């Protein structure tokens, strides 16, 4: 017998809405279900992890998960939760994005697990041969305008306006559910709480067109304890693609989670058991300064998304930032070095400036602007407050090419907390 999928989600705090009879239907038999992923970018982000984890739990409960990548709906744009219409993407861009998203999903879902192996489907495959007249005849006639107007995704846009393209989105998504119900025996669609209206439209279409069995479960919108949006930083989305968000930045996103959020996220974003999570929470509350939950959370998710080697490098980079010596920093890749010192002031000099050695006073003031004047530079040097690559220096120190890390960086410091990057090109 499969595990109780709904019970698993409930203790993890991952259910927002659920259609009556869903739990009974899933406990009765091994079932198929799906979640749709938006291919408007060539990478998913941490906001997508909630839905990915739902599919992971669905598969672990013995059911068969389908990941629908919307090659067709990506050309339309879902209005749910949006204040204005999105730019529509061309077919070539969407095809590229679909391939990239599938590779990321393969890190989480088992696509080779026999009967309940995950499958990827693309709704462009069943929409590409359907004419507009066929769609409005076979789909549109079953759902009334009044029904469509009652959806929050439509009502919230009535004042600002929405195009017919966006208005029709719920019919298109509803037909996805109908198609997968009919051809893949999917009896449940899963998604975020903002998708409830679109999902229910699908169950209604299934009922009216064929009377098939269809259920719905949505997850709550994840917010941070301070009320701000989850998955965003000052620099934007936290992506699953290391080329867009490095493993170090990804790790730091989770390690910097608040205590309250860590207790919630450890249930949602890891596969740790209830007993293990409760033990971790108890240990964390006894010694919050150790950040036990944050470390367990960051390590688990970073391994799952980027692998063990990337986690080791991220931990090494994190430790290097607070190291009293330069040894750890010297071992960082150029990318990790810049990530660790992101936001730190920088200035560029040429290698010719180092040919006879660059005097430390010039390096601190006239060449870089790190300090306001030569006078300030001399005062700080006299106070033994200046370091080059974490080693204290005197006013006669010369920076040469032997001081370069990764062949181009020198780390200047004032006191314990103020850093400056000298880039040599």
Image (spheres, rainbow, N blue to C red):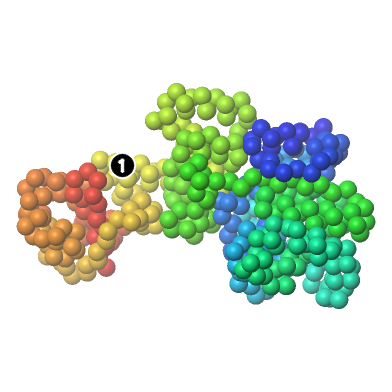
Please state the horizontal and vertical placement of residue 404, each as a whole percent of the image: 24, 57
The residue lying furthest to the front in this view is 159
In the image, residue 366 lies at what x, y percent?
13, 65
Residue in front for this viewpoint, 111 or 146: 146
Residue 311: tell me if it is visible: no
Q: Which image quadrant is residue 45 in?
A: bottom right
Residue 255, percent from left and from top: 45, 41
Left or right placement of residue 29 versus residue 312 in this view: right
Q: Is residue 317 visible?
A: yes
Q: Nearer the viewer, residue 58 or 202?
A: 202
Q: Residue at x 30, y 56 (%)?
A: 344
Residue 229 placement, left or right of 37: left
- Residue located at (52% from left, 28% from top): 281
Q: Residues within 10 Å of mark 1 (few under 14, many from 20)?
A: few
Q: Which image quarter holds the N terminus?
A: top right
- Vertical side of 94 occupied by 417: above or below: above
User: Height in image: 346 above or below 297?
Assistant: below
Identify residue for label 1.
322
The percent position of residue 300, horizontal first and vertical second, equals 54, 39
Name which residue lies at 58% across and 51% down.
Answer: 47
Q: Residue at x 28, y 45 (%)?
A: 327
């Amino acid at each position: 017998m499969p595990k109780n999928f709904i019970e698993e989600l409930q203790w993890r705090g991952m259910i927002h809405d659920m259609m009556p009879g869903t739990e009974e239907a899933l406990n009765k038999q091994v079932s198929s279900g799906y979640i749709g992923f938006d291919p408007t970018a060539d990478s998913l982000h941490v906001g997508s992890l909630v839905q990915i984890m739902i599919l992971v739990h669905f598969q672990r409960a013995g059911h068969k998960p389908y990941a629908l990548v919307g090659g067709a709906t990506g050309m339309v744009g879902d209005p749910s939760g949006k204040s204005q219409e999105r730019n529509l993407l061309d077919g070539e861009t969407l095809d590229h994005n679909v391939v990239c998203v599938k590779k990321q999903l393969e890190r989480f879902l088992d696509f080779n697990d026999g009967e309940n192996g995950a499958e990827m489907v693309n709704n462009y495959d069943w929409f590409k041969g359907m004419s507009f007249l066929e769609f409005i005849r076979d789909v549109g006639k079953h759902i009334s305008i009044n029904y469509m107007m009652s959806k929050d995704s439509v009502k919230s846009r009535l004042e600002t306006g929405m195009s017919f393209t966006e208005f029709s989105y719920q019919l298109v998504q509803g037909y996805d559910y109908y198609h997968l119900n009919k051809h893949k025996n999917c009896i449940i669609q899963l998604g975020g709480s903002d998708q409830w209206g679109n999902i229910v439209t699908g169950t209604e279409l299934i009922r009216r067109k064929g009377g098939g069995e269809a259920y719905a479960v949505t997850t709550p919108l994840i917010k941070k304890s301070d009320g701000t949006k989850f998955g965003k930083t000052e620099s934007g989305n936290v992506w699953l693609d290391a080329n867009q968000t490095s493993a170090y930045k990804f790790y730091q996103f989770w390690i910097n989670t608040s205590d309250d959020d860590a207790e919630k996220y450890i249930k949602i974003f890891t596969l740790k058991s209830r007993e293990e999570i409760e033990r971790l929470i108890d240990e964390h509350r006894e010694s919050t300064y150790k950040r036990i939950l944050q470390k367990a959370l960051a390590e688990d998710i970073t391994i799952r998304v980027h692998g063990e080697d990337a986690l080791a490098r991220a931990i090494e980079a994190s430790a290097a930032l607070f190291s009293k010596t330069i040894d750890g920093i010297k071992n960082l890749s150029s990318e990790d070095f810049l990530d660790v010192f992101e936001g730190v002031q920088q200035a560029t000099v040429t290698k010719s400036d180092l040919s006879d050695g660059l005097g430390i006073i010039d390096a601190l003031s006239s060449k870089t602007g790190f300090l306001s004047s030569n006078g300030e530079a001399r005062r700080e040097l006299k106070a033994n407050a200046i370091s080059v690559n974490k080693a204290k220096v005197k006013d006669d120190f010369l920076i040469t090419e032997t001081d370069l890390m990764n062949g181009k960086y020198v780390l200047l410091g004032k006191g314990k907390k103020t850093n400056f990057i000298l880039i040599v090109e």
